[in-house]
Image: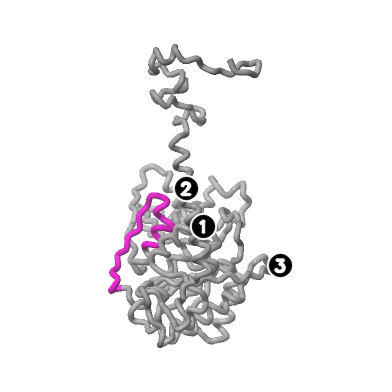
């Protein structure tokens, strides 16, 4: 029997080649998550990436008949609140479930046992809203955000003496990881690991700090942006056991849609978005909770600049969705015809081939007594 873990990153052809060395093999167990990162194919020409065995074995087995498949739905790694946000962001949209296998008491290392004050009482989620622009390297096209680096290091500086668990900083840009790695090394924090999101699949830590780097974009098409790739974001957000910190432009991430919006929609029900000033408040002995939100003598740590804009946009989206649904109620019902295009149905009898004024179910007397206006080829009404 051969067991292959992290099967999502196992190329189909390479695994088959390895298995050829076991002529007496009778069983093969492959574990992997199709919602996380797969084989990195960018180094290959686009013409050979699909269908030639270079992609992940999981995708091939999904289409193969006679393969026993079992879906594992219980997460024993993370705090229940983190699991709920990951489920909402990465799995619910695909009709899949992820449930927690842990209790709050089991996973209270950050929320109860660590002498820091979290933005929202007993919530392991910290969302730090920061809009300082990134700096892009003209040669490598990677990027850094010096102010986010400062925020992360200030946070680590306050947390590390008080939190005894492992800490992993996860970056979407290699340049950001290099900058933070240098900062961590300068402070001789040997137990703090810095990775890119692509390099941390299969790893976990007691506290994960995710740095998005990009900021300040108000309108963008992020559907193909690598920092909005569902698998990559899922990996980055799901590494933490007891706590998760996200440093980034929350308004931009919300606007990007996709997994980020789904994740934030769930997270915003469990925590409060804060500014970098929160880092001082987290160790302020005089800070207290007001309605479960951390408050100092200067007021709430809540990021008002995020909530003012986010509420306006969220309300606008809800109104647009409501208007769209209302409009759809009055559109002619359609069916899908053989060629893929819609067939218009009569509103009265729900059958194709005519509209309501020509419906045979109309009252005969009414139809004969009423003169119809029709458009003629000459371009007028009769």
In the picture shown, does residue 76 fall above or below 185? above
Q: Quadrant of the N terminus?
A: bottom left
Q: Tell me the SS state at disc 2.
A: helix
Q: Position of residue 301 (x, y in %)?
A: 46, 76
Q: Magenta segment range?
A: 84-106
Q: Position of residue 236 (x, y in %)?
A: 48, 66
- Judging by the rendered image, the residue that carries numbered circle 2 is 321
In the picture shown, does residue 163 fall above or below 240? below
- Judging by the rendered image, the residue that carries numbered circle 3 is 139
Residue 101 belongs to magenta span: yes
Q: What is the basis of the colouring in this image? A: one colour
Left or right for 134, reference 207 = right
Residue 169 belongs to magenta span: no
C-alpha distance separating marks 1 and 3: 36 Å
- Judging by the rendered image, the residue that carries numbered circle 1 is 313
Residue 278 or 110: which is nearer the viewer? 278
Q: Tell me the SS state at disc 1.
A: helix
């Amino acid at each position: 029997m051969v067991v292959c873990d992290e099967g999502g990153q196992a190329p189909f052809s390479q695994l088959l080649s390895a298995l050829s060395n076991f002529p007496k093999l009778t069983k093969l167990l492959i574990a992997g998550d199709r919602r996380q990162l797969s084989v990195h194919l960018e180094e290959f020409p686009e013409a050979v990436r699909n269908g030639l065995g270079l992609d992940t074995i999981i995708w091939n087995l999904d289409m193969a008949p006679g393969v026993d498949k079992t879906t594992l739905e219980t997460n024993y790694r993370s705090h229940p609140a983190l699991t709920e946000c990951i489920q909402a962001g990465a799995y619910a949209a695909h009709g899949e479930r992820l449930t927690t296998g842990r209790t709050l008491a089991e996973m209270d290392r950050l929320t109860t046992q660590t002498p820091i004050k979290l933005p929202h009482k007993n919530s392991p989620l910290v969302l730090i809203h920061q809009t300082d622009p990134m700096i892009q390297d003209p040669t490598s096209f990677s990027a850094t955000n010096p102010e986010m680096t400062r925020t992360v290091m200030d946070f680590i500086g306050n947390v590390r003496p008080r939190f005894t668990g492992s800490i992993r900083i996860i970056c979407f840009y290699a340049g950001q990881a290099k900058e933070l790695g240098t900062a961590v090394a300068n402070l001789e924090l040997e137990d703090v690991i810095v990775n890119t999101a692509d390099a941390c699949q299969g790893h976990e830590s007691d506290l994960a700090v995710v740095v998005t780097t990009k900021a300040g974009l108000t309108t963008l098409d992020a559907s193909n942006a690598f920092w909005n790739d569902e698998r990559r974001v899922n990996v980055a957000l799901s590494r933490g056991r007891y706590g998760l910190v996200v440093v980034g432009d929350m308004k931009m991430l919300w606007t990007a849609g996709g997994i980020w919006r789904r994740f934030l929609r769930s997270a915003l029900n469990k925590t409060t978005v804060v500014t970098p000033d929160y880092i001082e408040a987290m160790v302020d002995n005089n800070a207290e909770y007001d309605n479960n939100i951390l408050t100092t003598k200067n007021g709430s740590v809540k990021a008002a600049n995020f909530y003012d804009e986010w509420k306006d946009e969220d309300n606008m989206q809800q109104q647009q969705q409501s208007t769209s649904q209302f409009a759809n109620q009055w559109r002619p019902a359609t069916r899908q015809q053989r060629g893929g295009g819609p067939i218009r149905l009569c509103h009265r009898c729900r059958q194709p081939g005519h509209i309501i004024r020509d419906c045979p179910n109309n009252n005969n007397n009414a139809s004969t007594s009423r003169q119809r206006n029709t458009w003629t080829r000459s371009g007028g009404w009769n």
